[in-house]
Amino acid sequence: MQECPPFDPWLMPSKPADQPVDSYINIEGPLDLIEAAVEDKAPIAGMILSPCGTLLLTFSLLGIIKVWDIENNFRMLVALNDSADSSIADEFYTGAFPILQDFLPDSPSKSARVVERVNSKTSKKSHVPLTVAVAGKSKDRTRWCDDENDNAILPCDIKIFDLNSGHVISRLAGHQEEVLCLKAVVFKNTPYYISASEDGYIFKWEMQKDWRFAASILNATDVGLFIIIIFFYTSRREKSSTRMKDGANTCMAFSISFLPQTGNKYFVAACDARIAIFDFEAASLLQSFDTHYSCYCDFVAPIVPPAHLPPPPACWADILETATIDILADSEDCDAAEGGDAVREPMFAYVVSRGVEYMNRSDLNPVSNTVFMHRLTYPAAVGGEFRLQDVASFAHPSYQSNSWPTKVAANTRILVAPTNVGDVVIFNLASGRVAGILRDHKEVEVRDALLHPTKPLLFTCSDDGTVKVYRQCSAK
C-alpha cells in the first residue's frame, strides 16, 4: 500500500504563550469559568477553532456564524449570514476552515485579514483568500411540513463564505437533508471538503487550490466575466462531488474523522448505529462494526494516545514494508520469530465513540449512556482487515446524554462528555472515574466540547445559546 504523507491540519504558532489544559484537573489545577459573552439568540449547535487557534467560530440555529477573537477578550469580530434569498431560513450546525491558511484579527473595520505564510518545506509564499465553509439545514419559509412540525426542508447546500466581504461566494450542492459534519482535508496535495448528512450520504468535494470554488467550476476572476461563473455554477456544480459507496445501507451519517498515520487515505465515520471505515481515495466502504448503542452511534473520532496506555508504533508504512509474517493480534513487543523474521507490533489508533439508546422499547433493557474507548488495529498487510476492540467505558449517573448530535473531546488523561441536562462530565481516562462536573449551562442539551490545542482553555456550547469558556489555573 502506498503511504501518503500525513498532514496535520493544526498549524500552531511556533511559541505559544500558554500551555493546553493540563492532563490533570484537580484542586491544584482547577477550571475557572471566564466571563466571556460568547452567545447567540438561538441554540449554538457547533463550534470550531481556526487553524492557528486565535479565532472561535460558532454556528447557531438562526443561520448565523459568529467569529470571536480569542486573543482579545473574546470580542466578536463579525456575524455572518446568507441573506441573498429571504424565503430561505438556514440553521448552521458545522463548518470547516480551509487548510494552510493563517488567521489574524484585523482592525475594527474589518473582520479578519489574510497573512502571507512561508511554507517551511518549499520556502514559497502563498496568499490564500480567507474563507470558511459552513453547512446545516435550509428551510422554505413559505411552506410547512406537518410531519416535522417545521418549515419544509430544502436541499442543504454547503456554503462557502468570504470572511472579508461576508458574502457567500460558492455553494456545494448535493445533500438533500441536514449536513451534520464537514471537514477540510488535503490528500495527495489536492484540497477537499468532506461532508456527512442525515440523508445517509457522505460526499467528498474536490476544491480549487484557493478553496473558494469546486474544482469543476470555472472561477470568474480567471476569465474576467461574471456571466461565465454564473453559467458554470448553475450547470456544473453537482459534478464536483463524489459519493462514498456504502451499498446504500446507511440511513444517517453523523461524523467523520481521518485516521492517523494513513496520509488521509482512510477515515472513520459514525453511520446509524455502526462505526464504519472508508477508503477516501477509492470512495468506498471498507468495513463496519456494530456498536453497543441500541439506537444511534452519533460520534466517533481518534484521540491522542492516553498516557496510561501503550502508544502506537511510529509509522504504519514501516510495518507494512518490514513485516514478513503475520502480525500477532495481541503482540505488544517486537519478538524474534522462527527463522529470524521479526514480528512487528501492529499499527493501531485509539478512538472514542458515543451514542444514544432506545428507552421505550419493551424488547430492550434500558442502557445508561456510555462513552466507549476502542483500539482500532490496522491491517498488517495490503488487503487485510481492521480490528476494533473495546478498551474502556465511561458512565456515571450524572452522565445523561440521550440526545443527538453531541460530541465529546479528550486529551491524554481526561474525557469531556456533554449531557442533555446542561452538565458537562469530565472523566479520568485511566480510572474511569468522574474528575469533575461543570454545571454552568441551563438544563438543556450541551452539544459540543473543544479543548484548545495550545492554551489552557475548554469550550462548551449549548442549546441555551451560550458558549462557556473555562481556563485552567496554573498548578501550584
Image (cartoon, rainbow, N blue to C red):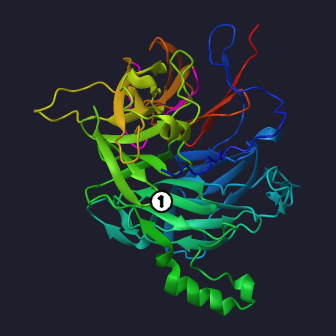
The main secondary structure of the magenta stretch is loop
Q: Would you say residue 394 is visible in this rendering?
A: no
Along the line of sight, which residue is nearer the eye, 8 or 455?
8
Residue at 55%, 53% in the rendered image: 183
Q: Which residue is mark 1?
A: 281
Q: From what the image shows, is residue 264 above or below residue 149? A: above
Asked whether, in this view, residue 382 is left or right of residue 462, the answer is: left
Along the line of sight, which residue is nearer the eye, 314 or 28?
314
Q: From what the image shows, is residue 83 above or below residue 130? A: below
Q: Would you say residue 393 is visible in this rendering?
A: yes
Q: Outermost residue, right direction? A: 107
Asked whether, in this view, residue 227 is left or right of residue 176, the answer is: right
Q: Outermost residue, left direction? A: 363
Q: Amino acid at mark 1?
A: Glu
Residue at 70%, 47% in the rendered image: 51
Quick one: quadrant of the C terminus?
Answer: top right
State which region is magenta. 398-412
Where is residue 212? Give x, y as percent.
66, 70
Q: Badge 1: how crowded within 10 Å, few (<14), some, or many (20+)?
A: few
Residue at 31%, 58% in the rendered image: 246
